[in-house]
Amino acid sequence: MDASLAAADPAAVPHAPRRLRYFSPWLLVATAVWLAAYCYAFPAPGALAARNWPLVLVGFAGAVIGNVTAIGGGLVFVPVMIFVYALDPVSSLKLAFMSQAVGMTSGATGWLNRGEVPLRLLRWTVPTLILGALVSSFVIRPNPMLVKGLFGPVTIIAGLLTLYTLNRQGGLPDLPARANPAVAAVSFFGGLITGWVAIGEGEIVAAFCMIAYHLNANRALGLGVVLLSINSIFLALLHALHFGGVPWDMAIFTMLGTLWGGRMGPFVAQWFSLRTAKKIFAVIAVADGTLIVLQATGVLARLKKLF
């Protein structure tokens, strides 16, 4: 690309992502901090670990999925907590916030290290996502019916958006200035939805940027992961410090898994076909959403009686 074209349209300048190594010393430091906090906060850490250690694997899997697609680990955490651990929907939501705060941040560092995040857009998207999260936390607070009623449709839509953007690999490394207000509005909507179902901000913003303005797929996903990280941290702090009710005896294990799984997301994205990964995770999203819809509408209960 010649200099005159780059000067005329900075967004058209080609972008070469940096390679990311999976391991980083801060992962060990964070794990040591986690271990110290775990042993200090729980009176019988050995017995608790013997009972809840599988949640580390759940956290790892959720973080990988969340950081490859920007959908968020809530795609895994909420259904697993409801169906496998019989946790109520609001407690499952709170656990998802805590887990994503760690996992999406771990993944965000990877996307940032790769240089795959259009940082200019953060000043337009972060204020509106915070506003959306505040509305969904204080004005229309999450309740069991709202969480279960919205999680299924939102997850199905996120999966379908992922399928729709399968073939969008190339594209611009940044958005034109005229896109700023629209992206800010979409970010507000994403923050609103995330406050109710733990997912939405990352995938909705990423899909919008790819579909409406042809943003490069990896750059769009990197932006989505960073935004969902910020959103999750904010919501985790709100629920931990203000609302309470976090199931810490379970969340502490998913958080450890997300710490290591989150970093795996951007690492995997550079070595494997993004198209294949998106296919797999879109199918998981649609299946998850359908299962929650069936459970929320009572269809699952009727099927159990029949069989």
Image: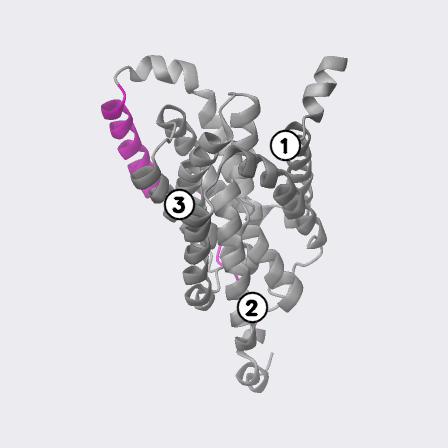
Is residue 192 depicted above or below 124 in this figure? above
Q: Is residue 100 left or right of residue 220?
A: left
The kind of residue on which mark 1 rests is Ile
Q: Is residue 6 magenta?
A: no
Residue 64 place in picture, x, y as percent: 52, 39
Q: Quadrant of residue 179?
A: bottom right
State which tag comes first along the sequence, 1 or 3.
3
The residue identified by callout 1 is 292
Residue 201 place in picture, x, y as percent: 52, 52
Residue 307 seen in this snapshot? no
Is residue 44 depicted above or below 179 in this figure? above
Please state the extent of the stretch shown in magenta in the rendering.
14-42
The residue identified by callout 3 is 235
Residue 87 place in picture, x, y as percent: 49, 24
The quarter of the rendered structure image containing the N terminus is: bottom right
- Distance, label 1 to label 3, CA atoms, is 23 Å
Give the residue displayed 55% in from the left and 39% down from the top: 146
Q: Quadrant of residue 296?
A: top right
Secondary structure beneath disc 1?
Answer: helix
Is residue 306 depicted above or below 38 in this figure? above
The kind of residue on which mark 3 rests is Leu
Q: Is residue 34 magenta?
A: yes
Residue 257 seen in this snapshot? yes
Give the residue displayed 49% in from the left and 38% down from the top: 63
Give the residue displayed 32% in from the left and 33% down from the top: 31
